[in-house]
Amino acid sequence: MAAACLHLGADDAITIFAAASTTDTLQAAVKAYELDQHVHVVCSFASSSLLAKQIEQGAPADLFLSADEKWMDWLAQRKAIAAASRVDLLANSLVLIAPAGTAVVITVEKGFAIGAAFRGRLAIADPTNVPAGMYAKEAFIRLGWWDALVGRLAPAADVRAALRLVELGEADLGVVYATDIRGAAKVVQVAAIPQDLHAPIRYPLALTATAKPAAAAFATWLQGAAARKIFTAAGFTVPSAPAP
């Protein structure tokens, strides 16, 4: 579900559509940018797939921050982004989580009996089109776990919704980004998923084809030192080179 960083809707506001997993961190970055530049920025957070489709249908976004390359590629093929502005802004990793207080022991390796390791369901962002779920499915297939898990999935609209299912005890296991559990007291990490089990988790940023001129300055700022400090403090890594 979309959420706004500000309740301001000025015609000259910059609008960024961003993956749900960036919610807290991007809101902090936006606040810093607004204080520094006195420019209004409005954010809309949801799954990358939903946001990409909204942009393609003409939604008024100036920037898109996706949680994977595929949905940015999809927009590029439709000439809905300014291709020259595209940059990999952030990187992340996946972890398995359980409700706090539970004793779940998981070894992430081929041959591990994942089906017997927990009861109930596995919360996962929809693996058919949401990046976090797609990365997780790829890893589970490589581990030989998918067949044991597919009938026990609790698909969620985005990764934050998957986290909530575990927080509420509606799923006994979940797969989310490492950054999602920062400050999440109701869950515990039970295992990290090695990054060589799935495609690299990158968050590409690009201006849309209809972006306001002021959006370019915000895109540049997001690649600079002040924003990098906010992103790395939240657990993201920054694969792109610093902006000049």
Image (cartoon, rainbow, N blue to C red):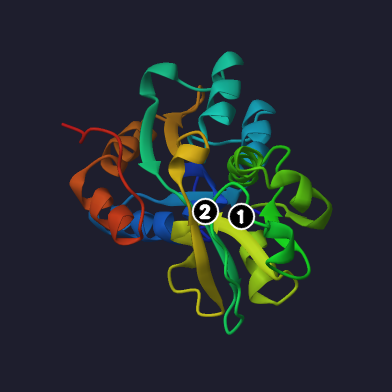
- Residue at 70% x, 28% y is 57
Q: Earlier in the sequence, mark 2 or mark 1?
A: 2
Q: Residue furthest front?
A: 111
Q: Where does residue 86 sit, x and y in percent of width and height?
A: 40, 25
The image quadrant that residue 196 belongs to is top left
- Judged from the image, the secondary structure of the residue bearing numbered disc 1 is helix
Q: Is residue 151 left or right of residue 216?
A: right
- Is residue 98 placed above or below 218 in the rendered structure? below
- Judged from the image, the secondary structure of the residue bearing numbered disc 2 is helix
Q: Where does residue 93 sit, x and y in percent of width and height?
A: 45, 49
**Badge 1: few (under 14), some or many (20 or more) residues near its Cα, within 10 Å?**
many
Q: What residue type is labelled 2?
A: Ser
Q: Evaluate if marks 2 and 1 touch, with contact meaning CB atoms under 8 Å apart.
A: yes
Q: Where does residue 214 sit, x and y in percent of width and height?
A: 35, 35
**Badge 2: few (under 14), some or many (20 or more) residues near its Cα, within 10 Å?**
many
Q: Which residue lies furthest to the left in this view?
A: 244
- Quadrant of the snapshot with the C terminus: top left
**Where is mark 1, residue-wise?**
159
Mark 2 → mark 1, Cα distance in angstroms: 6 Å
Viewer-closest of 11 and 211: 211
The image quadrant that residue 32 belongs to is bottom left
Q: What residue type is labelled 1?
A: Val
**Where is mark 2, residue-wise?**
21
- Quadrant of the snapshot with the N terminus: bottom right
Viewer-closest of 35 and 207: 207
- Residue at 50% x, 27% y is 208
Q: In this view, does 148 lie to the left or right of 223?
A: right
Residue 201 seen in render: no
The image quadrant that residue 128 belongs to is top right
Viewer-closest of 50 and 187: 187
Residue 88 seen in render: yes
